[in-house]
Amino acid sequence: MFVDESGTHGGSHAFVLGGVAIHEDDAQRLQVALDELVSTKLGRIPPNLEEYELHASELRNAKKPRPDERKAPAVTSIWANVPRTTRLELLDARL
């Protein structure tokens, strides 16, 4: 079972809790299908595929590094170098 929340960050007026239950026999097939989807959209199988987690907010707005290195470094998204159109295609994809 996977459960996640959204809207718990500052300034949000909504709280959403969602979950999905998958039979253990289907979990591996789902993981393979998701990995294949990411690899297809990226056009390659990255050696660090497990780092490409599918979070909708991150796919919509991947954080890029700050150009001014004197400021504190921002947390950079692994999706930052993937074109936004490709990331949005991942959100729209159907398995």
Image (cartoon, rainbow, N blue to C red):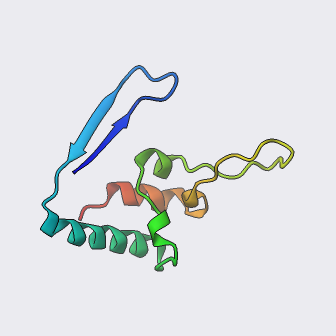
Q: Residue at x 69, y 46 (%)?
A: 74
Q: Residue furthest right?
A: 70
Where does residue 11 sit, x and y in percent of width and height? 51, 21
Q: Residue at x 48, y 58 (%)?
A: 85
User: In terms of depth relative to the viewer, which is nearer, 24 or 89?
Assistant: 24
Q: How many marks?
A: 0
User: In terms of depth relative to the viewer, which is nearer, 93 or 14?
Assistant: 14
89 sits to left or right of 61: left
Where does residue 50 sit, x and y in percent of width and height? 45, 68
Where does residue 17 sit, x and y in percent of width and height? 28, 34
Establish if 14 lies above or below 19: above
Where does residue 40 sit, x and y in percent of width and height? 40, 75
53 sits to left or right of 18: right
Q: Residue at x 16, y 57 (%)?
A: 22
Where, by quadrant of the figure, is residue 38 drawn? bottom left
Q: Residue at x 35, y 36 (%)?
A: 5
Establish if 24 lies above or below 67: below
Q: Quadrant of the C terminus?
A: bottom left
